[in-house]
């Protein structure tokens, strides 16, 4: 099947002063399949926004190319397939949500009722039907972000590209945007979005790409990134001696709490042993790799392209 998005050997240099240059992308290649949600994660400065701006033809690459449904991203035809939520969407905030969507619709060539119907369909979808006639300046950050998503959908694009759609939102706002992205997938749209927070992408993405310093260090399912979790057992008091007898030699004290890391495959065996000793267990929690650890190591790719 035709890829929704094909990014091929993308390199981007920015000029800095007369001589220096910043290398934002170093030969990035990536395909986004039709109907999938692909999240591009990476620390600040990794090149996520640069990638997205090149896809949207707002920036020219130094080298490489992007195809959208097989069409060169430089061609205006490619834009017809794309909806776009920029990193910091700015609104004409004296307008109401409805007026803003109607304005977007007119730019897309929609006339009369067509634009109005689409605007209200989308306001309902992003749960802004009660705020549609309110000035955008009165919107919360979460409401503004949902309006931005509605705006990206006005032209009924097959592919929705979003730059940090969850940034700056509280946990409820993040969950709402996640739900919205999942509902777009149900409508068979392709979604490509960026985030600097792994947690935002791992729950909803079919595949995740990790971008570090302009290079893709991982591409595959989210579960593989954090494939073998370990468990952290905390016991109140100093029980290092007993744990050592049970073969757990690496327990440490943090304050008055004994902490020991347990591998997933030996969890039950250890817990049975510990239970026999009647230890005052304080907590048992799944320990995941921190994002820093993940960004630091080359996880390798699960699938090619
Ligand atoms: N217009 C620009 N001029 C010069 N350098 C830029 C420009 N835009 C981005 N950069 C640099 O390119 C790198 C990648 O930036 P960006 O794509 O915004 O990363 P991200 O979105 O992952 O945070 C950073 O080092 C950033 O400082
Ligand atoms: Mg960015």
Image (cartoon, rainbow, N blue to C red):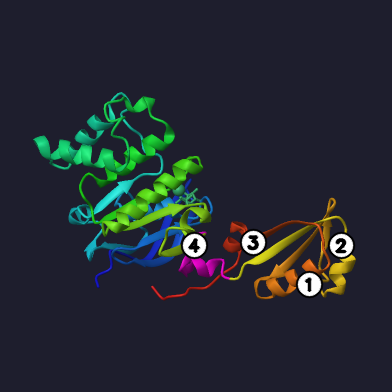
Asked if residue 166 can be seen in this view, the reply is: no
The mark that comes first in sequence, 1 or 3, is 1
Q: Quadrant of residue 152?
A: top left
**Which residue is labeled 4 in the image?**
210
State the SS at label 3. Answer: strand
State the SS at label 2. Answer: loop
Q: CA distance from mark 1 to mark 2?
A: 13 Å
State the SS at label 1. Answer: helix
> Residue 48: percent from the left, percent from the top?
44, 54
Camera-nearest residue between 66 and 295: 295
Stretch in magenta? 213-227
Camera-nearest residue between 181 and 10: 181
Residue 158 highlighted magenta (yes or no):
no
Residue 88 sits above or below residue 184 on the image: above
The mark that comes first in sequence, 2 or 3, is 2
State the SS at label 4. Answer: strand
Q: CA distance from mark 4 to mark 1?
A: 39 Å
Identify the mark at residue 273; answer none if there is no mark: 1
The mark that comes first in sequence, 4 or 2, is 4
**Which residue is labeled 2 in the image?**
239
**Which residue is labeled 3 in the image?**
286
């Amino acid at each position: 099947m035709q890829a929704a998005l094909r990014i091929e050997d993308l390199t981007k240099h920015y000029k800095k002063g007369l001589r220096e240059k910043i290398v934002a992308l170093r030969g990035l290649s990536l395909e986004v399949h039709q109907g999938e949600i692909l999240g591009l994660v990476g620390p600040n400065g990794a090149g996520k926004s640069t990638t997205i701006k090149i896809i949207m033809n707002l920036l020219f690459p130094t080298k490489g190319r992007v195809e959208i449904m097989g069409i060169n991203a430089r061609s205006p035809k490619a834009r017809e397939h794309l909806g776009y939520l920029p990193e910091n969407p700015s609104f004409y905030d004296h307008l109401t949500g409805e007026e803003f969507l109607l304005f977007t619709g007119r730019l897309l060539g929609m006339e009369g009722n067509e634009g109005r119907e689409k605007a209200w369909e989308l306001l309902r979808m992003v749960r802004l039907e009660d705020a549609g006639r309110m000035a955008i300046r009165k919107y919360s950050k979460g409401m503004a972000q949902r309006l931005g998503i509605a705006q990206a959908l006005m032209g009924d694009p097959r592919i929705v590209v979003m730059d940090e759609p969850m940034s700056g939102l509280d946990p409820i706002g993040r969950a709402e945007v996640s739900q919205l992205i999942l509902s777009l997938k149900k409508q068979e749209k392709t979604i490509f979005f960026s985030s600097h927070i792994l947690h935002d992408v791992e729950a909803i993405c079919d595949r995740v790409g990790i971008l570090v310093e302009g290079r893709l260090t991982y591409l595959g399912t989210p579960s593989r990134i954090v494939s073998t979790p370990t468990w952290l057992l905390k016991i109140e008091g100093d029980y290092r001696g007993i744990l050592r007898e049970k073969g757990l030699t690496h327990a440490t004290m943090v304050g008055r709490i004994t902490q020991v890391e347990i591998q997933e495959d030996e969890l039950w065996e250890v817990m049975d042993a510990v239970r026999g000793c009647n230890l005052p267990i304080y907590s048992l929690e799944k320990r995941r790799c921190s994002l820093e650890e993940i960004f630091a190591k080359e996880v390798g790719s699960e699938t090619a392209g």
